[in-house]
Amino acid sequence: MNTVALIPARGGSIEIPGKNIRDICGKPLITWSIEQAISSKLIDEVFVSTNSPEIASVSLEAGAKVPFLRPEELSSDTSSTESAVLHFCDFLDEADISVDQIILIQCTSPVRAQGRLDDAVSFFCK
């Protein structure tokens, strides 16, 4: 089964500017989630959907794939996470990339027990 992780991370936070790439205990916030997804035994690829070149750069450095910058109309304060997921699904279709399942990972909630992402994928598959 082909499982990919999608980490949506828009730039332009008003309350905490640059929050997704702010240093948290020695590394950018988004890097924690990227590293957890990469270390998963059940996740095959890790993608980040962002409108920010800075977030894209940090994500690529951490090992994620960032095949596009998300359009600004899907990256506002009022844009939904669902719109980012649907945009990612459109990308997969256009790139003829077949996946069986997508695990959505919010980078603003990086505290997860080791193996928790594999637990989630296993539970979903059952």
Image (tube, helix red, strand yellow):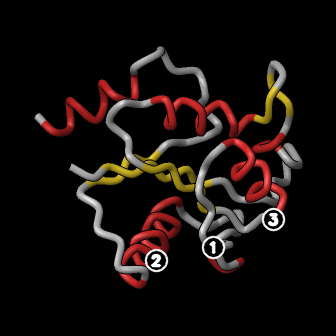
Which residue sits furthest left? Answer: 126
Whichever of labels 1 and 2 marks the residue nearer the N terminus, that label is: 1
Q: Position of residue 69 (x, y in %)?
A: 68, 72
The image's mark for residue 91 is: 2
Residue 37 horizontal/vertical position (percent):
49, 36
Left or right: residue 3 versus residue 85 is left
Task: Read off the residue under disc 3.
Answer: 53
**Which quadrant would residue 20 be assigned to in this image?**
top right
**What element does badge 2 sit on?**
helix
Q: Earlier in the sequence, mark 3 or mark 1?
A: 3
125 sits left or right of 71 in the view: left
Element class at badge 1: loop
Q: Residue at x 62, y 40 (%)?
A: 107
- For marks 3 and 2, give the CA distance: 18 Å
Q: Camera-side residue: 9 or 91?
A: 91
Going by the picture, which residue comes out furthest to the right? 17
Q: Residues within 10 Å of mark 2 (few under 14, many from 20)?
A: some
What amino acid is at disc 1? Phe
The residues tagged by marks 1 and 2 sit, at their Cα atoms, a distance apart of: 9 Å
- Mark 1 highlights which residue? 68
The amino acid pointed to by label 2 is Phe
Q: Looking at the image, which is closer to me, 101 or 77?
A: 101
